[in-house]
Amino acid sequence: MRDFSRPGRSPVYAANAAVATSHPLSTLAAIEVLRGGGNAVDAGIAAVAVQCVVDPLMTGIGGDCFALYAPAGAAVPIALDGSGRAPAAATPDWYAEHGVGIEATSPHAVTVPGAVAAWDRLVRAHGTRPLGDLLQPAIRYAEEGFAIQSRVAWDWARCAPRVRADADAAALYLPEGRAPAAGNLFRLPRLAATLRRIAEEGPRGFYEGPVAADMVEKLSRLGGLHTPADFAAARADTVTPIATRYRGYDVYECPPAGQGLAALMMLNVLQPYDVGALSDLDRIHLFAEACKQAYHHRDALFGDADLARVPVSHLLSDAWHAAARGDIDMTRARGPVLYPEAAEAVAHRDTVYLCVVDQDGNALSLINSIFQGFGSGILAPESGVLLHNRGLSFRTEGGHPNSIGPGKRPMHTIIPGMLMRDGRAVAPFGVMGGHYQAMGHVELLSGILDRGLDVQEALDAPRSFAYGGGLELEAGIPDAVMAGLAERGHPVLRAALPLGGGQIIWIDRAAGTLVAGSDPRKDGSALGY
């Protein structure tokens, strides 16, 4: 239990249903759906649609979506992959022939957005309300306006250069040439009209017709390879989740092209250690050493498992994690473990994560992203759709599992998680933060299962991340620990930005309650009733 004489948050306890999101209006939308009789999927889709309006630099309908859904009584969660695919003309040969790379603001970083297809598939398979009904709160905020929250305003100002480069995006998102401040009211009428079209026509209203034509025209004008046929072929897929066992619990993740496999690999490395008994110095050192090895394999081997061979079984095998542990020296840091030409080592991408447990015990873990702040910065002007830049994760050279290719999905950083035990859901959970997310899953779960923290304490705890040749430490990690890590050979630095943000809902069946937490690094909240 926290010290009530100090600033902080308490976990939220609820008897019937609970929601945790990174924006208060999203949390409110989900609660209203639940109180009106909707289930976890209904509430989650209403919430994420609202956040696509009120937190536009973090997520949007021009991005991607993944979900893990555990219906009450299901022994294994259902995994949904709503990641976008590259255009049919996008081949490594084309990029080599034209001498073109994939830059953050390039149309080549834009894959066909998968979020709307994912929402529709999830609602049709598992919801109780039509998608059009669930989009109404988002439509109202886009039409009538919403107040900008503090963290949203801070990120908006920080990421303003991204939209300043696109005249259409700058005119919308930088009124009077600057980012709006916290407390300002903001409207997105063209996005409202697009959401209304989706509400009336379903995903066809996004992937075909005027909205799709607007996106294709803008991308083509900038040199993109997208065609109407690429958009019309968009789909979300039900996939088989992957899992490992940790401290008596089953930890489920979506399979590659997502990076959830890296989280499972790190948990396997930690298995023999008494993590809860380690000092802060030893624990952070151990996490860093496990992280470097898992991410090295991620950058070398992960890609679209439908079109490339990813050795999932080997990477989850006893042989792999025994070998990884054999390379760990608890007194000295290994040198940087970097795959040649590794992906850009920036830990802080922009995403939203939410979770819901409803009155019947159905649990949803959902994540939606446009990757970097304001995505590609490319706005389709008539539809108001801001396009993501998830294709930045692709490699343009051939032969790599993550090489760009026709209809291929890039390696994805966004990963929802689901904790299960004895064939029942225990906790939907997730941590945003781009590359950090796999490490974030490990730190969150270890905080609860190894250190005995409650869900809010585990989210509040200061974070560390070893990637790209450095070891980032949040401000809450003491200077003495930082000095000790440096003495062991870690290239330590203070994190310039908060490391991610997360949500979790713990299902306490013994007490008959739900325990929800929401990350203080964001504007959001957990609520229940």
Image: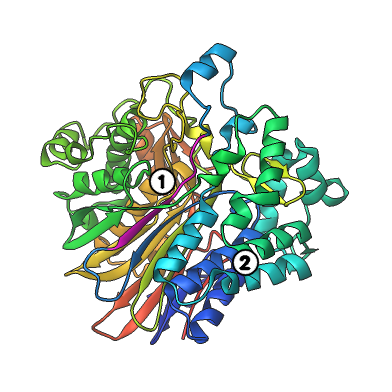
Q: Nearer the viewer, mark 1 or mark 2?
A: 2
Q: Quadrant of residue 413?
A: top left
Q: Residue at x 43, y 21 (%)?
A: 341
Instruction: Say which mark, if any, is on residue 464.
Output: 1
Q: Residue at x 34, y 84 (%)?
A: 513
- Going by the numbered disc 1, the residue's amino acid type is Ser
Point out residue 401 in the picture as x, y percentages from the top left corner: 35, 28
Query: Was residue 83 drawn as part of the magenta stretch in this picture?
Result: yes
Q: Is residue 397 above or below residue 201?
A: above
Q: Which residue is mark 2?
A: 199
Q: Is residue 408 above or below residue 243?
A: above
Span of residues in magenta: 77-86
Point out residue 215 in the picture as x, y percentages from the top left corner: 67, 43
Badge 1 or badge 2: first in the primary sequence: 2
What colour-coding does the image apply?
rainbow
The quarter of the picture where the N terminus appears is bottom left
Q: Residue at x 44, y 41 (%)?
A: 435
